[in-house]
Image (cartoon, grey):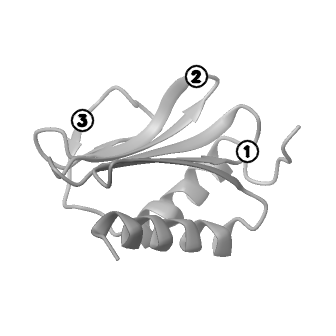
Amino acid sequence: MSSLDVLRDELCDLFKKQFPDVEFIINERRSATLEIRIFFTSEVFMESYFNAITGKKSFALVESGKRIWGYDNYRYWHHHPVENPESHVACNEPSLKKIVDDVQTVLAKIGRLNEKKR
């Protein structure tokens, strides 16, 4: 099993446990890149991207086509807080569990936690 397979399975399992009704769109290319969209509503989804060659990882919570929160390691690990998603706050690499927990916190903060897909 490749490192991307492990990441995919772990991330999807964590989201399924915490958000049983989410829908996934998974796109894998040549065992090098993995993109996962996790839909909470028709307008809110989590975009996750992994590149096994470059080591790039990104996690963005998107609402109506705009990033509202996230983590990524472009140049260095940093966080895009919901209060100012364009800012870059340096941090350590978050665990996948922390990311899932943070998504739940952000969805509650923006009033989207218990919405159903339309």
Q: Amino acid at mark 2?
A: Gly
Secondary structure found at label 2: loop
Q: Is residue 20 above or below residue 54?
A: below
The percent position of residue 10, horizontal first and vertical second, equals: 46, 73
Q: Amino acid at mark 1?
A: Arg
User: Crowding near pointer 1: few (<14 within 10 Å), some, many (20+)?
Assistant: some
Q: Which mark is residue 112?
A: 1
Specify the label residue 27 is tagged with: none
Along the horizontal axis of the image, is 114 left or right of 108?
A: right
Quarter of the rendering occupied by the N terminus: bottom left
Which-is-in-front pick, marks 3 and 2?
2
Q: Earlier in the sequence, mark 2 or mark 1?
A: 2
User: In this figure, which residue is indicated by the disc labeled 3?
Assistant: 88
Q: Residue at x 40, y 43 (%)?
A: 70
| x 45%, y 64%: residue | 8
* Residue pointed to by mark 2: 65
Q: Is residue 29 above or below residue 42?
A: below
Q: Residue at x 66, y 69 (%)?
A: 16
Give the residue at x 64% y 23%: 64
